[in-house]
Amino acid sequence: MCEFNLNCYAHVILCFEKCYTNKVVIIIFLKIFKHCFSGTRFRPLSFEVPKPLFPVAGVPMLQHHIEACAKVPNMKEILLIGFYQPNEELNRFLLNAQQEFKISIRYLQEYAALGTGGGIYHFRDQIVSGSPEAFFVLNADVCSAFPLTEMLSFQKEHGEPNSFVILGTTANRKQSMNYGCIVENEESNEVLHYVEKPSTFVSDIINCGIYLFNPDIFQHIGAVFQKNQQDMLLLLGTEPTNGWHRAEAIRLEQDIFTALAGQGKLYVYKTLSFWSQIKSAGSAIYASRLYLNQYHTTHPERLASNKEGGPKITGNVYIHPTANIDPTAVLGPNVSIGTGVTIGAGVRVRESIILHGANLQDHCCVLNSIVGWDSTIGKWARVEGTPSDPNPNDPYAKIDSETLFREGKLTPSITILGCNVTIPSEVIILNSIVLPHKDLNRGFKNQIIL
Amino acid sequence: MKALILVGGYGTRLRPLTLSVPKPLVEFCNKPILLHQVEALVKAGVDHVVLAVSYMSELLEREMRVQEQRLGIRISLSHEKEPLGTAGPLALARDLLNDDSEPFFVLNSDVICDFPFKDLLQFHRNHGKEGTIVVRETVQVFPMLSCCILTEPSKYGVVVYEADSGRIHRFVEKPQVFVSNKINAGMYIFNPSMLSRIQLRPTSIEKEIFPVMAGEGQLYAMELQGFWMDIGQPKDFLTGMCMYLQSVRQHAPERLRTGPGFLGNVLVDPTAQIGENCTIGPNVTIGAGVVVEDGVRIKRCTVLKGSRVRSHSWLESCIVGWSSSVGQWVRMENVTVLGEDVIVNDELYLNGANVLPHKSINESVPEPRIIM
């Protein structure tokens, strides 16, 4: 079985040439440690597709990043840095994106999982070629309005010419501790203190995983790299050979930002625009909602509308042109329908992602679920999950980090059907996760079905 | 002679093991399940095995090429693109099975037993009719294992046949009252003429084909001697392992490992290393390259290739997946199954944990659940 089971960070680096040509580097990382918990949080969907290519609001997750970058004037190149073996799907995506946005997009494969800082450091020559003034770095698994131009203006107005900027947003007190926390000087917006996932409350301003750097950053990463190497030699007496203690495995957040805080080099630009992490499958539905909403201003053509002979649409719905939908179906709000999907008579879909090739038979009801590629849902079946959305009454609430289990029981969450799952007629599948290629013969509640 | 093995699809009941390796290649007592069956077939004179699969695996194809060479036989793959039920695959493989007039074997890929293929062939030739199915008792008693396995007849088709000749009178699907305690063991032999009874569509052999053959007096039953198990899910995989090892003790005791520190039936690959002060067994299988450190207690487990069990741990009724690592002072029990490359940290307790591949376990699992 081939699996894209490791978490990834995409970093987009945007470079400005002296003549204002821009280079963007997207770095897709594998988490440093293969057995890290979050490396498998996108299962079972990650069995089929690398997370950065999972469709959110109808298009691959990464495409939202690329579209945002393409808006910045004089965009020229995108570099993707990651540990994935290049595969057909990734290559096809890159090719299509190149053609559509008319920019060069290259994938640079790391030789080992080098961490968020190590990756850009390793390829620094490629990044600084053409002498850009500054560049952006974006994580792949964030959903954001990407206020890149605003970050640029902010950088020019604040602090010293070669300062770095972190995009920040406000979280509520309790949830802030799940993220990188930023303590700022409220007047100058300088970052005074940075802690990644603190155990006690530090600040309600959190790191969005979107940064604006300039080539000076490599001096700082280089210094950490040297220090790591020396520490390794002291500790082990020899060059480390296994991935756990590579000198080049450098995390921007823990190793670089923490050191740079309070030195007059690091600033935070706070945004009120939407932002969310996409760690688990459930958060993909929430991210879809955010992007679908954004389509009103950015891509209104992607939003379905009520038409003669078409299904009834409520709220924001994306329907791929090749989908075949019965006019008596009712879709939305927050629904994405993929390529070649068939939806029968009287079907109700709400707050869900229906992946390509799926077949929803007459009168079935799909709520708060992700229906996998080529799956079939039988007549009158009910496939339902429990949304894990942030509290709508709290403007700063973020989607929960979602542990699958609490007190030994499976936490009610989004129902996920893996690829090629068959749900028989008239059953209920509630708060369950079904692994690929299962042919169910009855209903299930609150279970993982292997 | 030919044989058709119904391999089927993704082997989802044996997940998480089958997330890494196709089910026929999962090692049962240190040999891929499929090989137990193929080798027994070859001994009975089979030189062409057809695997009926509904999911093509490159790994399986490659391994089959290797076995072809090794055993000097032909292995074909018949790929059903749509579900064909239990009889349809025979129709799909018709051309492969039909090319001479010799009878062909059919068996279910999850079955493990003392394969009676030679006897079956003889029995079949003696009565000269179109088909013979192997039947088994619904109660199996194992005095040496102090256990008795009862299969509910009503879950399967029950077979009613003449004790002397073996001629089957009828099948009763899920009987409400006691009819017979003999059920289908999932192994058959047929004359190629029987293939004309099956159309290429989803067909149930038990419901549509056998009753007709029985009605015409063309179907006979042969009783299976010895143990039988469907090892398609972890709990039964372990039970089957116990039965198989007991059978090894009876027929080839030199294969088992004995001596200080080994209790009951234990099978250890020659390349495995066992530390000091361990107590291994009864009913344990240790795969190739496995390292068991000092002071480990293992009972009723399968430890697959390349794993490491670190010191002072206690394992009962578990399957440790390939290349996994179990920490020190770990207690694992109650059909805990570790997929490939799982790391269990020190001093944890796993009760009925079902762990998917490439996971690292940092917390105890006090109640059975799936770790994804």
Image (tube, coloured by chain):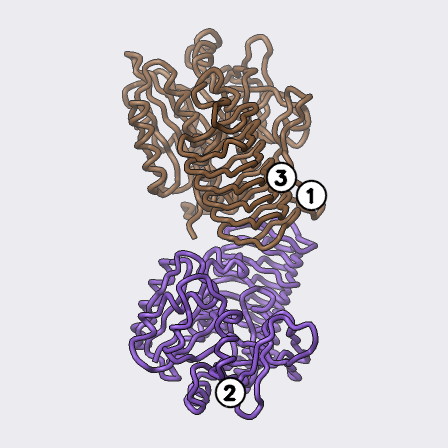
Chain colours: A brown, B purple
> Which residue type does callout 2 highlight?
His
* Eye-nearest disc, 2 or 3: 3
- Crowding near the residue tagged with mark 2, few <14, some 14–19, many ≥20 C-alpha atoms within 10 Å: few
Q: Name the residue tied to disc 2.
A: B251
Q: Name the residue tied to disc 1.
A: A406
Do callouts 2 and 3 point to residues on the same chain? Answer: no
Q: Return the chain for callout 3.
A: A
Residue A438 position, x and y percent, is: 52, 53
Q: Which mark is residue A301?
A: none
Tag 1, which secondary structure? Answer: strand
**Residue depicted at x 43% and y 46%:** A240
> Which residue type does callout 3 highlight?
Gly
> Which residue type does callout 1 highlight?
Arg
Left or right: residue B102 versus residue B337 is left
Q: Return the chain for callout 2.
A: B
Q: Quadrant of residue A19?
A: top left
Residue A217 position, x and y percent, is: 41, 23
- Crowding near the residue tagged with mark 3, few <14, some 14–19, many ≥20 C-alpha atoms within 10 Å: many
Q: Earlier in the sequence, mark 1 or mark 3?
A: 3
**Residue depicted at x 44% and y 69%:** B32
**Residue depicted at x 61% and y 27%:** A398
- Crowding near the residue tagged with mark 1, few <14, some 14–19, many ≥20 C-alpha atoms within 10 Å: few
Front residue of B130/A410: it is B130
Q: CA distance from mark 1 to mark 2?
A: 50 Å
Front residue of A148/B120: it is B120
**Residue depicted at x 38% and y 15%:** A72
Extreme-front residue of the structure: B216
Residue B330 position, x and y percent, is: 63, 59
Q: Name the residue tied to disc 3.
A: A385
Residue A64 position, x and y percent, is: 43, 25
Q: Are marks 1 and 2 in contact (CB under 8 Å)?
A: no
